[in-house]
């Protein structure tokens, strides 16, 4: 329990000689591109057909 009684050395940043100035700058701020609308399918067969032929996810 001696750790609770030990004094902590508190130092300022200026005492350590560290530069804390901002090194980054904002070049531009843009909105993300609009997303395309989703496609609603009526059945599982239609979904599987689209995944095979259009998206080429299922082989």
Image (cartoon, rainbow, N blue to C red):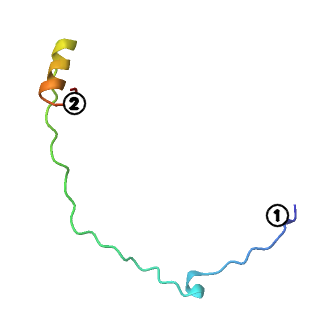
N-term mark: 2 or 1: 1
Which residue is painted at 19% across and 52% down in the image?
Answer: 31
Which residue is painted at 17% across and 31% down in the image?
Answer: 56
In the image, 55: left or right of 19?
left
Viewer-nearest residue: 28 or 58? 58
Q: Is residue 4 above or below residue 53?
A: below
Viewer-nearest residue: 59 or 26? 59
Quarter holding residue 14: bottom right
Tag in front: 2 or 1 = 2
Q: Secondary structure at mark 1?
A: helix
Query: Given the current orientation, which residue lies at the most extreme right position?
Result: 1
**Which residue was labeled with disc 1?**
4
Please rate how many residues cluster around mark 2, counting C-alpha atoms within 10 Å: few if below 14, some from 14 to 19, many from 20.
few
Q: Is residue 2 above or below residue 48?
A: below
Please rate how many residues cluster around mark 1, counting C-alpha atoms within 10 Å: few if below 14, some from 14 to 19, many from 20.
few
Quarter of the image where the C terminus is located:
top left
In the image, 47: left or right of 20?
left
In the image, 12: left or right of 48?
right
Q: Secondary structure at mark 2?
A: loop
Which residue is painted at 65% across and 80% down in the image?
Answer: 11
Which residue is painted at 37% across and 77% down in the image?
Answer: 23
Quarter of the image where the N terminus is located:
bottom right
Q: Position of residue 32 (x, y in %)?
A: 20, 50
**Which residue was labeled with disc 2?**
57
Q: Position of residue 15 (x, y in %)?
A: 60, 87
Q: Position of residue 46 (x, y in %)?
A: 15, 15
Quarter holding residue 28: bottom left
Q: Is residue 46 above or below residue 52?
A: above
> Which numbered marker is on residue 49?
none
């Amino acid at each position: 329990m001696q750790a609770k009684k030990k004094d902590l050395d508190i130092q300022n940043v200026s005492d350590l000689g560290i530069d804390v100035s901002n090194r980054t700058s904002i070049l531009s701020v843009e909105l993300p591109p609009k997303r395309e609308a989703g496609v609603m399918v009526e059945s599982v067969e239609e979904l599987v057909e689209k995944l095979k032929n259009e998206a080429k996810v299922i082989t």
